[in-house]
Amino acid sequence: MIKHHPDQDLLFAHAKGELSLSMAIAISAHCALCEACKTAVAQYTQEAADLAFNQHEIDDTTADNIDISANDISLMQSALPDELQTMLAQILCQPELATAPSNEPILVSVKNQHYSVPSVFRQHLDRPWQQLGKVSRMRFTLNEMNTRASLLHIEALGEIPQHTHKGNELTLLLAGEFSDINGNYVPGDFIMLDGHTKHAPKTLKGCLCYIVLDAPLHFTKGLSKLLNPIGELIY
Ligand SMILES: [Zn+2]
């Protein structure tokens, strides 16, 4: 069972479309795996829409001296040049899209393992995997300054050396399992950590995660010089 969820502020911000793309992907993917948060976001979205709609109603009443009839609109249309009139007519008679974009999960393959992930990742999976030992990473191209988002795969019996963070680390477990000092995680768990947590995640069976980092890892055990390549791979 999923134990770790995004907090309500994040869900509300997501419903209002206020999050960065890297975080919006994380919330969407979590909601694809978590019925409770999916329901909450649907409610918040409705509330945000109601608020916006009421705002429009207020705006409309202040503009009640503007009265445009259907007749005026057809007069305005007929005042357009012929070319634009034809284009407008063509647009208006287009059939609605027969197929909505698919929400079916998609397959991700790495190191001969195949995982099913939420459809929100569909347009970001065209990047190559970089590998170092048991760890593989596919970094997305989201262009968000220091914030970097990636898929991270750790093979069975793999481990990330103990580290902390100068910034924030979000991990969304998509498939498989891993554990750290705080316990075991299952697919859907949404884990937000800041610089106060030291941990060394390890996996027995292997795992695929979506991670968002806004600073490099800071290793707290061993020679950081030796660990730098793994740190660079993950960030
Ligand atoms: Zn949830």
Image (cartoon, rainbow, N blue to C red):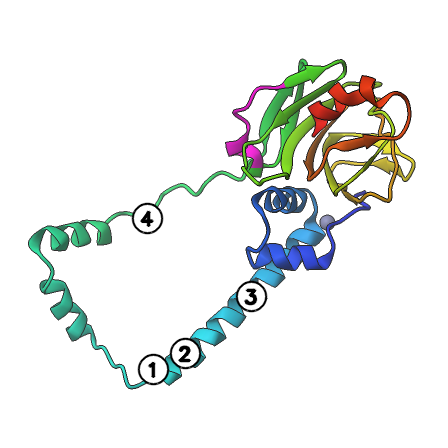
Residue at mark 2 to residue at mark 4: CA–CA distance: 30 Å
- Where residue 16 appears, x then y in whole percent? 56, 59
* Amino acid type assigned to the residue bearing label 2 in the image: Asp
Mark 2 = which residue?
Answer: 59
- Where residue 70 appears, x then y in whole percent? 20, 73
Residue at figure coordinates x 70%, y 27% from the top left: 152
* Amino acid type assigned to the residue bearing label 4 in the image: Glu
- Secondary structure of residue under mark 2: helix
Tell whether label 1 touches label 4 (CB within 8 Å).
no
- Secondary structure of residue under mark 1: loop
Range drawn in magenta:
121-129
Crowding near the residue tagged with mark 3, few <14, some 14–19, many ≥20 C-alpha atoms within 10 Å: some
Q: Quadrant of residue 30?
A: top right
Q: Quadrant of residue 217?
A: top right
Please identify, in this view, whether the residue under mark 3 or under mark 2 is nearer the observer. 2
In the rendered view, does 159 fall on the left or right side of 142?
Answer: right
Mark 1 = which residue?
Answer: 63
Residue at figure coordinates x 69%, y 49% from the top left: 35
Mark 4 = which residue?
Answer: 96
Q: Quadrant of the N terminus?
A: top right
Tell whether label 2 touches label 1 (CB within 8 Å).
yes
Residue at mark 4 to residue at mark 1: CA–CA distance: 32 Å
Please identify, in this view, whether the residue under mark 2 or under mark 4 is nearer the observer. 2
Mark 3 = which residue?
Answer: 48
Residue at mark 1 to residue at mark 3: CA–CA distance: 23 Å
Of 180 and 221, the residue lying toward us: 221
